[in-house]
Image (cartoon, grey):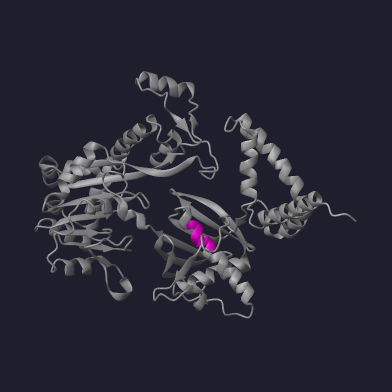
C-alpha cells in the first residue's frame, strides 16, 4: 500500500477537528452536564462536518450583516480561532502566558495547601480549573466572580464585567465543590463548614503583578455559594482628567481639595465607582507635603507615601476607632472608605472643622438623599451645615463597543420628542454585539456626576428651615436622578453610550 501524504494530512485534520469539538462540548453552556458524554461521542464522528456547516453559516451571516465582505478573511479568522484551541473559560494559552499563582495571606501557594488527596491527577485538574477561573476573570477585568448552584447537579460560574453579570461556565456539582474548597482553602476558610457564612481573602501573582481578592461563602439551596470580589489595582491609576468629569465639575473638585479643611462626600449605590473617584482625588494631592491617612474596607490600591489602614472588626479595628486614632497622628487629609454609622459621621464632620480635609463615601442614590441619610444616622443639622462642603453623586454607564455599534432605531414618538426639544439625534447608536465585546455591545465604562456645592445659602437653609428638610425628604431622589439623566443624555447624544443603557442605570 503506497504512502499518500495528502490522505495523512486530511486524516490528521479530521482527528484534530473531532477533538476540538469534544473540547467545545466540554465547556459549552448549551449542553446540560447529563448529555455531555453523548454529545462528546457524537462530536468525535461529526465534528469536522459540523465545523464546515457552522463556517458556511458564519460567512453568510457576516456578509449579510455587512460586518465583513472578504470571504477569505472570515475563513482565515475562523481557522485561526479553531487551531488556537480553547480552555475552560476562553482561549487557551501556554503555561508561561497563563502563569498564575494563588497565595494565601502568608504567601503559601495553593498547591501546597490543597491537592494532597489520593488522586494527584484529579487534584491537579481541579487546581487548573480554579487557576483558569481566576486568571480569566483578571483578563476580562471582572469586578466579581460568583459561583453558585443552578440545581442539584450543576453549578454556574459568572463574572460581573462592566457592572453586568454573565455566565462563563457550567460545572458538575462534585467538580465545582472541589473548586470552591480550593478557593476556601487558599482564603483561610474552613472547607468542612458549608452552611455557616464565612469570609476570607487571597492573593494572585501574575506576570502583570499582584491582585487581591475578598471571598464570602454562604449555604444556599442545592449547595454552597461563593462570591469573590476582585480588588482592582487600576483604581489608583485614575486621575480627575480620565474619570469622565466635565471641565466645570473638575474645576469644582480641584478647588475643594486645594483647601486645607472641609469635607467632600461621594455618594451612589454599590459598584458606582465611588472609591475610584476618591483615589482620583487623592492622586491630585501632593502626598509628599501633606500627611494623608486612609481608612478603608478593604484597601483596594496601595498609594505610595499615604498611610492606609484596613478595617478589621474581628480585631477591633473599626472606622470610628481608626478615625479617633488618626486624629492624634497630625493628618492633613483623611479618607474614609464608607460612613456607616452616626459615630463615624460625627467624627468625620468634626474633623473637617478642625483643619483637616476629609474625603468620604456614603451609600445613597442622590445628593439630597445623602443629606437625609446623615440626618437619619442622627447627625445634627448644625454639624452637617458647618462641616460639609461638597456632595457628589455618580453612576457608571457602559461604553458602546466602537467595533460593532449601529445607528439607533428610534420610534416615531422618540423622533418627534427630539425634534420638539431641538436635539440632534443623528449620532445616537445602539448596542449590537461582536467577539471583541463578547456579544454584549459594550466595552468599558464611563462615569456621570451630579454635584451639590454646600454654599452659605444652603448651609443657612439646612440649619434654619424645617420646611426645607421636609421638602428634601419628600422629593427624595427625583432631583438627583433628573440631573444625572441630563448628564447621561449628553453621553448618549455624543455616541458614547445608548438610550437603553441610560435607562437601565438611571431609570
Q: Identify the image quadrant of residue 168.
A: bottom right
Above or below, 359 against 421 in this view is: below
**Quadrant for the C terminus in the image:** top left
Q: Provide the residue span drawn in magenta.
A: 132-137
Residue 220: tell me if it is visible.
no
Residues 408 and 347: in front is 408
Horizontal side of residue 463 vs 420, given as left or right: left
Residue 136 lies in the magenta stretch: yes
Identify which residue, 249 or 390, lies in the foreground: 249
Q: Is residue 432 magenta?
A: no
Q: Position of residue 325 (x, y in %)?
A: 17, 70
Q: Quadrant of residue 156?
A: bottom right
Residue 397, compared with residue 108, is above or below; it is above
- As drawn, is 474 to the left or to the right of 27? left
Magenta-colored segment: predominant secondary structure: helix
Residue 54 shows in the view: yes
- Residue 402 in percent (x, y) is at 46, 36
Amino acid at each position: 500500500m503506497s504512502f499518500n501524504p495528502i490522505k495523512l494530512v486530511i486524516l490528521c485534520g479530521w482527528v484534530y477537528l473531532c477533538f476540538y469539538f469534544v473540547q467545545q462540548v466540554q465547556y459549552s453552556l448549551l449542553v446540560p452536564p447529563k448529555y455531555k458524554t453523548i454529545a462528546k461521542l457524537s462530536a468525535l464522528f461529526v465534528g469536522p462536518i459540523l465545523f464546515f456547516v457552522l463556517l458556511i453559516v458564519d460567512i453568510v451571516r457576516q456578509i449579510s450583516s455587512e460586518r465583513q465582505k472578504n470571504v477569505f478573511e472570515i475563513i482565515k479568522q475562523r481557522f485561526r480561532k479553531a487551531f488556537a484551541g480553547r480552555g475552560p473559560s476562553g482561549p487557551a494559552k501556554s503555561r508561561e502566558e497563563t502563569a498564575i499563582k494563588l497565595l494565601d495571606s502568608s504567601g503559601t501557594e495553593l498547591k501546597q495547601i490543597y491537592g494532597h488527596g489520593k488522586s494527584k491527577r484529579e487534584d491537579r485538574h481541579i487546581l487548573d480549573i480554579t487557576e483558569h477561573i481566576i486568571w480569566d476573570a483578571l483578563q476580562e477585568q471582572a469586578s466579581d466572580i460568583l459561583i453558585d448552584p443552578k440545581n442539584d447537579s450543576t453549578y454556574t460560574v459568572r463574572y460581573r464585567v462592566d457592572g453586568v453579570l454573565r455566565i462563563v461556565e457550567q460545572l458538575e456539582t462534585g467538580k465545582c465543590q472541589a473548586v470552591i474548597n480550593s478557593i476556601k482553602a487558599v482564603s483561610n476558610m474552613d472547607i468542612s463548614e458549608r452552611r455557616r457564612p464565612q469570609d476570607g481573602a487571597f492573593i494572585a501573582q501574575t506576570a502583570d503583578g499582584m491582585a487581591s481578592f475578598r471571598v464570602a461563602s454562604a449555604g444556599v439551596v442545592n449547595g454552597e455559594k461563593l462570591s469573590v470580589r476582585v480588588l482592582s489595582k487600576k483604581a489608583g491609576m485614575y486621575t480627575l482628567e480620565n474619570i469622565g468629569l466635565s471641565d466645570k465639575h473638575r474645576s469644582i473638585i480641584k478647588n475643594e481639595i486645594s483647601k486645607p479643611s472641609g469635607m467632600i462626600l461621594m455618594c451612589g449605590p454599590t459598584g458606582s465607582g465611588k472609591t475610584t473617584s476618591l483615589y482620583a482625588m487623592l492622586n491630585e494631592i501632593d502626598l509628599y507635603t501633606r500627611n494623608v491617612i486612609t481608612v478603608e474596607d478593604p484597601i483596594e490600591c496601595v498609594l505610595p507615601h499615604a498611610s492606609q489602614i484596613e478595617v478589621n472588626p474581628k480585631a477591633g479595628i473599626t472606622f470610628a476607632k481608626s478615625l479617633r486614632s488618626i486624629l492624634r497622628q497630625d493628618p492633613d487629609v483623611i479618607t474614609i472608605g464608607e460612613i456607616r454609622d452616626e459615630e463615624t459621621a460625627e467624627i468625620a464632620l468634626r474633623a473637617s472643622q478642625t483643619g483637616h480635609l476629609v474625603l468620604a463615601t456614603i451609600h445613597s442614590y442622590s445628593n439630597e438623599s445623602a443629606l437625609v441619610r446623615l440626618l437619619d444616622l442622627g447627625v445634627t443639622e448644625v454639624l452637617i451645615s458647618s462641616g460639609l462642603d461638597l456632595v457628589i453623586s455618580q453612576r457608571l454607564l457602559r461604553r458602546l463597543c466602537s467595533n460593532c455599534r449601529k445607528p439607533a432605531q428610534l420610534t416615531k414618538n422618540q423622533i418627534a420628542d427630539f425634534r420638539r426639544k431641538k436635539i440632534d439625534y443623528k449620532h445616537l447608536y445602539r448596542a449590537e454585539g461582536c467577539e471583541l465585546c463578547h456579544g454584549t455591545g459594550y466595552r468599558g465604562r464611563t462615569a456621570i456626576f451630579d454635584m451639590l456645592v454646600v454654599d452659605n445659602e444652603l448651609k443657612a437653609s439646612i440649619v434654619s428651615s424645617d420646611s426645607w428638610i421636609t421638602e428634601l425628604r419628600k422629593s427624595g431622589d427625583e432631583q438627583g436622578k433628573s440631573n444625572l439623566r441630563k448628564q447621561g443624555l449628553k453621553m448618549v447624544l455624543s455616541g458614547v453610550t445608548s438610550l437603553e443603557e441610560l435607562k437601565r442605570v438611571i431609570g
